[in-house]
Amino acid sequence: MTPEELGQYLEARRLLVDEALDRYLPGTGDNPKEIHEAVRYSVFAGGKRLRPILILAAAEAAGGQAEQALGAAAAIEMIHTYSLIHDDLPAMDDDEFRRGRLTCHKVYGEAMAILAGDALLTQAFILLSAEIPSYPPLRKGGWGDLEGVRGSEARLMVIQEISQAAGSKGMVGGQVVDILHEDREVDLPTLQYLHAHKTGALIRVCLRVGGLLASAASEQMEALTIYGERIGLAFQIVDDILDLEGSLEALGKQAGSDLRKKKATFPALLGIEESRRWANRLASEAKQAVSIFGDRGAALAAIAEFVVTRRG
Amino acid sequence: MTPEELGQYLEARRLLVDEALDRYLPGTGDNPKEIHEAVRYSVFAGGKRLRPILILAAAEAAGGQAEQALGAAAAIEMIHTYSLIHDDLPAMDDDEFRRGRLTCHKVYGEAMAILAGDALLTQAFILLSAEIPSYPPLRKGGWGDLEGVRGSEARLMVIQEISQAAGSKGMVGGQVVDILHEDREVDLPTLQYLHAHKTGALIRVCLRVGGLLASAASEQMEALTIYGERIGLAFQIVDDILDLEGSLEALGKQAGSDLRKKKATFPALLGIEESRRWANRLASEAKQAVSIFGDRGAALAAIAEFVVTRRG
């Protein structure tokens, strides 16, 4: 897949995800409209939709259709957005800008931002447990060792995997460790723990959920899981590098904000060059893992390349 | 059921609920331990466990076993506790005491309190989607018009009902309207909307979930739903009255705090006497609704009486 083809692929799927989010979020006409305005302000703030696109790409790699996974994809983006809203709060990272726009609490106030995050997290589970056309029962067979599993059981497994990834031993746990180590020196194992949980857990589960919804076989699930772990960490290392190098225009948030807050980062511990080598090695391992899908894994391979070469 | 019998009933079920919460929450030895300490501090702060007990009582009224509903009961208490932690935050109601103890953010800081709430909400869905011994597949038959529904489908319905009740058109929506009307005059319809959402939605869903898990028939579900709506509102009216009349010792929070913050309350709009009459009428309607269960509904009837006669 050429960079141009990947660009078209990402753009087409970003539109699918945005349409799904618009369909599955309450409208600004729904009461109380203030909360739905705040929710939509943050959800439609121009994200890359990397996580939901990974769900769709994983489903396609495993032989499924992107449409099967759109509900779960929208749900994951809701959870991701809730985590950004809460992380930006004054009591947490205290960020005024996100993706070049004012953060939710700067526009709607702290109380509404806390509630918008709460609403988004809850909406994800409304969506995952709902009967929705784009989230059909699994096709028969497949599912690795789970052959014959019924649609409802599969959906419960998706809810279980996503809630575990988002909870106190996953994403929330990572943010806890991040907060606890602010203004403190951290060593490499702590930094790896932090990223594996704060951002890694949710990225990893995207690949697994895409696989589950496409009835992936066991070895396919294994390959998707490895891919997810590798690019999750690579993504964070590159984020650290970009934060150090970037500018307000390129990143949409104040460059160097991690450094300003003395946040633990890979370049701070390893240097920029070594950090880049590490990210590239992880991307290679991710590509290697999904080579078992052949042509169907081309998008995942191209995304792994994109994650470590992106400039913003 | 005499007041003494009700006291024993509530105490026995409170112990069951506390055991379930202890079993289904991560321990303080689980990493990161700081978040699990904060979560357990708030969950084990001495609540009455009214909501989970209502789930158990509804299941029993409909002919089921309390044990069938313990997982869902623990999950509801987690969601209730998350809402208290977030409501107490400085940006929201800014309360320093809850049930006579310092609030979560006063002990663990604002960041950890926000994350403890997030963790509890997520943990509820981990629990509801997990294979746990106390949350078995439904017994065959029953389920009103849903005869033959499979265990996994029933559990998805429970997740759907609970997430809807907790979300932006339920509990979170009620808190939004409460925040928006702070320091403003409200009329009776707005106050009713506020309470039906902020506290009513979660209480109502307790009765429905208890019924669902016990394979309640359609007319039983209807009776439980009416009961839940009536006592949900009665509970809030009595809370308003107690807040006005109460003392720090009796309530465990600063008495008159609603008045201090000019919160909309029933006694402020209707006077204490008329508010009491209203609460008593609602409790009578609730008891009338569950009379169809005969002796099996005795606990629910006694709880309705308790809700409007309690002194704290």
Image (tube, coloured by chain):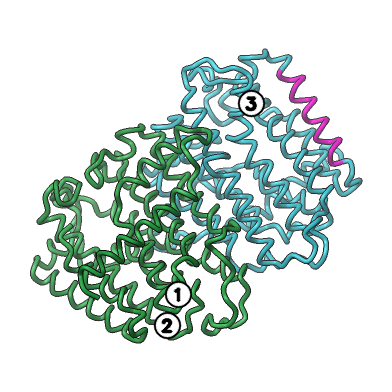
Chain colours: A green, B cyan
Give the quarter of the image for residue A221. bottom left
Number of the label disc, if any, that sits on residue B192: 3
Q: Mark 3 lies on which chain?
A: B
Decide if residue B37 is in sight here. Answer: no
Looking at the picture, which amino acid does disc 3 mark?
A: Gln
Sequence-wise, which precedes: disc 1 or disc 2?
1
Q: Mark 2 points at which residue?
A: A220
Secondary structure, magenta segment, majority class:
helix
Q: Mark 1 lies on which chain?
A: A
Looking at the picture, which amino acid does disc 2 mark?
A: Gln
Residue at image position (56%, 20%) is: B264
Residue at image position (74%, 20%) is: B276
Badge 3: how crowded within 10 Å, few (<14), some, or many (20+)? some
Q: Which element carries disc 3, helix, strand or loop? A: helix
* Residue stretch in magenta: B275-290
- Give the alpha-carbon distance from disc 3 to disc 1, as whole Å: 46 Å
- Give the alpha-carbon distance from disc 1 to disc 2, as whole Å: 7 Å
Number of the label disc, if any, that sits on residue A211: 1
CB contact under 8 Å: marks 1 and 2: yes
